[in-house]
């Protein structure tokens, strides 16, 4: 596993019996993301897929939206005073003609493995900077595809209306868990996965930070020219925070599902942008907080107000 995991001595107590043994822990190290040579952000992450993480982070920041806007990403040589490369600093270079945002104290940020860019973004900022506006209403009665204008590109972006069956959604947590190879060894990682609306696993990334796992997923999609992810379901292993909803919207993901609760701001963002947000996805139970028009509810299903 390389730097993804590390071994540490642990004293284990089981049923009163004490023993000493090595334990496998998930690695956590800082990653500094530079843009055009200038420091932009530092995040605590599990090493691996660092270039994808940086690219995904810049998608969520509204800097990148397609592979042709990215020139390259490199590890910075001589990252320490002694000139050693720690592989903990990456520099992102944008393609010619792509505007470089001004890096100010407000934009130069520190993130943690638990909460991402806490309070940095706003609902208005996400709504005005996303390149891939979601369909915020049910499909037209005649079945035509909703079409929105992209103000940043001055062309038309066709939004593919999708529908997903609740039984398909209910199967995703187990499929996510079964694909978490490093979690199986450490028990200390979050995961994010992309699924088709039929429940087929497309990609999965693990990281000590839930927002990093999503950035790695989105960054890989950008590198492979797959944005927007307009026909995918994003499944996350923890709660659905505002930051995760933001990242889904910025990548054009129409459905975000989580095994735990969403925050109130995540729900507000989902309602404003048209994101379908599902929480407490456990077994056959789930809560749909926004965008229910993408969920294929049984015909004539009764609803009640508790």
Image (cartoon, rainbow, N blue to C red):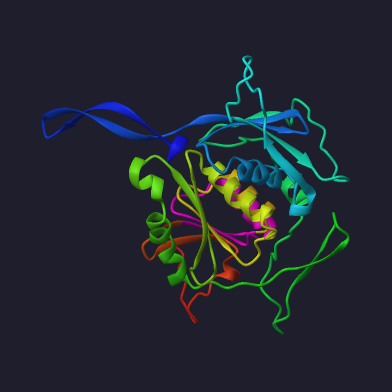
Q: In percent of the image, x 60 and y 46: which residue is there?
A: 215
Residue at point 40%, 45% (across, down): 182
In front of the other: 179 or 237: 179
Q: Which residues are magenta?
A: 253-279
Name the foreground residue: 80 vs 36: 80
Q: Quadrant of the N terminus?
A: top left
Relative side of 13 to 37, left or right: left
Front one among 22 and 295: 22
Query: Which residue is most to the top?
Result: 81
Q: Position of residue 6 (x, y in %)?
A: 39, 32
Q: Does the rendering let one see residue 66? A: no
Residue 132 position by quadrant: bottom right
Q: Quadrant of residue 2?
A: top left
Q: The C terminus is located in which quarter?
A: bottom left
Whole-percent x and y of residue 156? Answer: 83, 67
| Image spot of residue 188 (x, y percent) | 39, 39
Q: Give the x, y percent position of residue 42.
A: 62, 29
Residue 280 falls inside the magenta stretch: no
| Residue 269 magenta | yes
Residue furthest to the left:
16
On the question of residue 165 being in view, the answer is yes
Query: Which residue is at a point 58% across and 51% down the rendered structure image?
Result: 217
Which residue is depicted at the point 59% across and 64% down?
Answer: 232
Foreground residue among 289 and 236? 236
């Amino acid at each position: 596993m390389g730097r993804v995991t590390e071994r540490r001595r642990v004293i284990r107590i089981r049923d009163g019996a004490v023993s000493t043994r090595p334990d496998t822990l998930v690695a956590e190290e800082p990653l500094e993301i530079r843009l055009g040579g200038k420091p932009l952000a530092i995040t605590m992450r599990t090493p691996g897929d660092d270039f994808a993480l940086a690219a995904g982070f810049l998608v969520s920041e509204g800097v990148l939206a397609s592979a042709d806007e990215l020139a390259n990403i490199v590890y910075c040589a001589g990252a320490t005073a002694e000139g050693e490369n720690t592989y903990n600093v990456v520099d992102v270079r944008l393609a010619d003609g792509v505007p470089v945002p001004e890096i100010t104290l407000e934009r130069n940020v520190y993130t943690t493995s638990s909460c991402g860019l806490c309070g940095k973004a706003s609902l208005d900022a996400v709504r005005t900077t996303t390149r891939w506006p979601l369909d915020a209403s049910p499909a037209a009665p005649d079945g035509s595809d909703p079409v929105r204008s992209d103000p940043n590109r001055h062309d038309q972006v066709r939004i593919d209306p999708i529908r997903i069956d609740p039984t398909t959604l209910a199967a995703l947590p187990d499929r996510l868990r079964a694909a978490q190879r490093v979690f199986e060894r450490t028990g200390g990682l979050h995961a994010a996965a992309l699924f088709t609306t039929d429940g087929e696993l497309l990609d999965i990334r693990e990281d000590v930070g839930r927002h990093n796992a999503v950035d790695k997923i989105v960054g890989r999609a950008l590198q492979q020219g797959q944005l927007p992810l307009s026909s995918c379901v994003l499944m996350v292993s923890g709660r659905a925070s505002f930051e995760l909803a933001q990242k889904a919207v910025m990548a054009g993901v129409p459905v975000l599902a989580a095994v735990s609760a969403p925050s109130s701001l995540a729900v507000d963002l989902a309602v404003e942008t048209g994101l379908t947000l599902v929480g407490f996805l456990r077994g056959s139970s789930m809560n749909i907080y926004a965008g229910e028009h993408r969920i294929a509810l049984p015909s004539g299903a009764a609803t009640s107000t508790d």
